[in-house]
Each structure stands twice: as structure tokens, then as C-alpha cells.
Image (cartoon, helix red, strand yellow):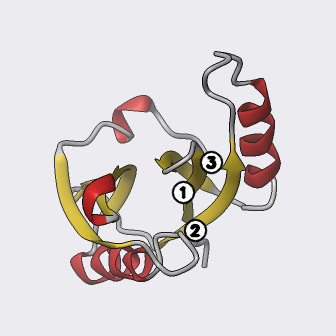
């Protein structure tokens, strides 16, 4: 599979928002993003995730192109747990991301969000090869 960087460049975005699921993951927002990609016949390229502390809400941005062949995607969450960010050493977080990523195929991109107490969650967007 050969891709040129120009195929990754994108300038269209869609925003999704909602509450965290009871387990602290993105919950139903994952399905909303996948359904939008399928219905809109787009080529998803990136995600952004922001945790909005006061209302315990998430905002997810989906970056995409609509001028190439569409493909299905899925968003999946992996709770990474607490990370000591005060030390400035993120090697344990890197190890957790690497271990979590090894369990998913065809990762297009990833994002992290942090909830209270330095609790990290990884979101990966994967291509769902048919």
C-alpha cells in the first residue's frame, strides 16, 4: 500500500460532542464518528479529542477528505491509567501507548485525553479493511 503525504493532507472537519461513557471512554461518540464517515462517503484522516472538565464532556474533531475514495473507520478507546506527568518523564506513557497500539490493526491516527488525576485514555482511529 503506497501513500504519498499529499493524500494525508486535509482541510475539512466535523465536530462531535457528548458525555463520557460510564467507563470513562468515548462511548457512543465512537459510533457517531463511524456512522458519519460511512454516510458521508468520506476518507477520514485525523482525529482530535478534548476533554472539557467542567461538564465532563468530550469534543472530537474528525479531519477528512471528500475528494477520494471513502473507507470505513472505527474509533476505539484504551484506558491507560494514571501517569506521573510532574516528573516530565513520559517513557511509561510511551510504553503504554505502544502496548495498546499493538492490539489494534490498521491504525490511521491516535489521540490522548486526560481526565481528573492525570488519568490517560488513548483513542485510535483504525481503517476497517473489508
The residue depicted at 73 percent of the width and 61 percent of the height is 104
Of 74 and 5, the residue lying toward us: 74
**Marks 3 and 1: in contact by CB < 8 Å?**
no
Labels 2 and 3: the sequence-earlier one: 3
Label 2 neighbour load within 10 Å: few <14, some 14-19, many 20+: some
Q: Left of 73 or right of it: where is 101? A: right
Q: Left of 51 or right of it: where is 91? A: right
- Choose top left, top right, bottom left or bottom right for residue 91: top right
Residue 62 appears in the picture as rendered: no
* Residue at numbered disc 3: 1
**Marks 1 and 2: in contact by CB < 8 Å?**
yes
Q: Position of residue 122 (x, y in %)?
A: 59, 53
The residue depicted at 58 percent of the width and 68 percent of the height is 76
Q: Left of 100 or right of it: where is 71? A: left
* Residue at numbered disc 1: 123
The disc placed on residue 76 is: 2
Q: Position of residue 95 (x, y in %)?
A: 81, 36
Q: Position of residue 51 (x, y in %)?
A: 36, 53
**Marks 3 and 2: in contact by CB < 8 Å?**
no
Label 1 neighbour load within 10 Å: few <14, some 14-19, many 20+: many
Mark 1 vs mark 3, CA separation in Å: 24 Å
Label tally: 3
Mark 2 vs mark 1, CA separation in Å: 6 Å
Q: Nearer the viewer, mark 1 or mark 3?
A: 1
Q: Nearer the viewer, mark 2 or mark 3?
A: 2
Indicate the secondary structure of the residue bearing disc 3: loop
Labels 1 and 3: the sequence-earlier one: 3
Amino acid at each position: 500500500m503506497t501513500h504519498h503525504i499529499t493524500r494525508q493532507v486535509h482541510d475539512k472537519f466535523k465536530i462531535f460532542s457528548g458525555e463520557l461513557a460510564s467507563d470513562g471512554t468515548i462511548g457512543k461518540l465512537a459510533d457517531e464518528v463511524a456512522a458519519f464517515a460511512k454516510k458521508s462517503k468520506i476518507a477520514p484522516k485525523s482525529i482530535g479529542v478534548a476533554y472539557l472538565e467542567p461538564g465532563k464532556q468530550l469534543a472530537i474533531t474528525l479531519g477528512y477528505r471528500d475528494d477520494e475514495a471513502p473507507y470505513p473507520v472505527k474509533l476505539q478507546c484504551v484506558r491507560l491509567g494514571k501517569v506521573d506527568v510532574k516528573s516530565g518523564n513520559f517513557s511509561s506513557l510511551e510504553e503504554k501507548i505502544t502496548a495498546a497500539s499493538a492490539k489494534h490493526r490498521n491504525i490511521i491516527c491516535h489521540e490522548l485525553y486526560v481526565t481528573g488525576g492525570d488519568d490517560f485514555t488513548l483513542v485510535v482511529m483504525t481503517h476497517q479493511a473489508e
